[in-house]
């Protein structure tokens, strides 16, 4: 297979000359080969973390690509059908995709496996999204009769909130600059305000502005900061770690500047910490607003929110800030945040096992 990798301002747009699903089929083969499972007939749960119209448990029509993915010939097609066809073309795999789900749904399922009170799944990683359990009679887009179905999982796809302009009033000059230089301009407005893919870049843009105004680095902009993507989100987490630990010397903050090769003074470190806290706090507030609204929509006596994603997992105080602001916005609501590590993968496995069991029962 021939791959063409295009680097775009530290983002990676992956374009495959053949179907990227052929590559996934090869990965499945390698995985099973290393575990001596090639002779097993196995059901597969497919975590497909992109907006899709799910017409059945094993039918997912891609609506659009997000982040920096742009693989031709897949939008409007059934991703499950294409992956199954790629697997069958190999002729050396006894694997069938029996279920497709979003990563948020997988996280919700994994959370419910760990805690029966779980009714919301949340991803805070490269991007952000959430899903929740909804009464089927409240789903206006439901087509046909409900039958004996009482509840369904609703994938919110909140990363695209604001694409219609309703969030323009709150966008700063840094948000506007980031969007202008992004791969998908004008799209996924909400997650660009705080998700892991963009939080570091927002911080970089603020630091450059402060240097331009003579408030950092003696008024000289370090050339390293002029390169888009040079200040990754992991630096934000490192700087925040110093603040949480209340160290006399901000070792982690210093290491970020040292890694970039930027000369700095003590005031520069203090300002850096303030900027990182500001972008972090805004992220927590925006997430808390949406989670609070979702909690009220779910309207349960007690609700667990299953969370997965690198930003949530590695940021030292995002968890506590989220709790703080959700409590302020939903006084009296009982809730808890549960880290469901690899929830998307484990949830897909659980759904595949359930789907396979139900199919076996149906044909027995």
Image: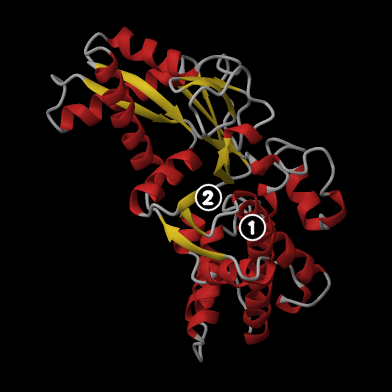
Mark yes or no: residue 309 visible.
Answer: no
Q: Quadrant of residue 53?
A: top right
Quarter in which the C terminus is drawn: top left
Image position of 107 (left or right of 325):
left
Q: Nearer the viewer, residue 114 or 38?
A: 114
Q: Residue furthest bottom?
A: 248
Q: Nearer the viewer, residue 170 or 204?
A: 170
Residue 11 image point, x, y percent: 58, 41
Q: CA distance from mark 2 to mark 1?
A: 10 Å
Q: Which residue is mark 1?
A: 287
**Callout 1 environment at 10 Å: few (<14), some (14 to 19), or many (20+)?**
many
Quarter in which the N terminus is drawn: top left
Question: Are circles 2 and 1 on residues that touch, CB within 8 Å?
Answer: yes
Residue 15 image point, x, y percent: 53, 24
Residue at position x 62%, y 77% from top? 273
Residue 93 image point, x, y percent: 23, 16
Q: Which residue is mark 2?
A: 122
Q: Nearer the viewer, residue 65 or 114?
A: 114
Assign a secondary structure to mark 2: strand
State which tag comes first along the sequence, 2 or 1.
2
Residue at position x 16%, y 32% from top? 34
């Amino acid at each position: 297979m021939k791959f063409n990798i295009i680097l775009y301002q530290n983002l990676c747009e992956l374009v495959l000359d053949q179907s990227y699903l052929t590559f996934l089929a090869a990965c499945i083969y390698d995985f099973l080969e290393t575990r001596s499972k090639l002779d097993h007939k196995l059901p597969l749960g497919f975590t497909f973390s992109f907006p899709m119209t799910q017409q059945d448990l094993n039918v997912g029509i891609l609506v659009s690509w997000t982040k920096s993915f742009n693989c031709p010939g897949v939008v409007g097609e059934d991703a499950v059908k294409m992956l199954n066809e790629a697997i069958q073309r190999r002729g050396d795999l006894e694997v069938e995709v029996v279920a497709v789900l979003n990563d948020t749904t997988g996280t919700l399922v994994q959370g419910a496996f760990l805690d029966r009170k779980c009714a919301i799944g949340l991803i805070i990683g490269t991007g952000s999204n959430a899903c929740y359990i909804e009464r089927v009679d409240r789903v206006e887009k439901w087509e046909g009769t409900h039958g004996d179905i009482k509840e369904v999982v609703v994938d919110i796809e909140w990363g695209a909130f604001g694409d219609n302009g309703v969030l323009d009033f709150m966008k700063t000059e840094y948000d506007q600059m980031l969007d202008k230089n992004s791969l998908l301009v004008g799209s996924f407005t909400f997650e660009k305000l705080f998700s892991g893919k963009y939080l570091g870049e927002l911080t970089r843009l603020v630091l450059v502005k402060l240097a331009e105004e003579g408030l950092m680095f003696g008024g000289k902009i370090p050339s390293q900061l002029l390169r888009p993507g040079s200040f990754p989100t992991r630096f934000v987490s490192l700087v925040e770690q110093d603040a949480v630990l209340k160290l006399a010397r901000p070792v982690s903050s210093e290491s970020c500047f040292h890694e970039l090769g930027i000369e700095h003074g003590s005031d520069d470190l203090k300002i850096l910490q303030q900027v990182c806290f500001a972008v972090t706090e805004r992220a927590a507030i925006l997430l808390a607003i949406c989670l609070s609204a979702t909690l009220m929509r779910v309207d349960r006596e007690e609700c667990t929110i299953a969370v997965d994603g690198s930003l949530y997992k590695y940021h030292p105080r995002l968890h506590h800030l989220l709790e703080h602001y959700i409590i302020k916005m939903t006084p009296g609501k009982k809730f808890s945040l549960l880290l469901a590590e690899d929830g998307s993968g484990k949830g897909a496995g659980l759904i595949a096992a359930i789907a396979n069991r139900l199919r076996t029962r149906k044909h027995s």
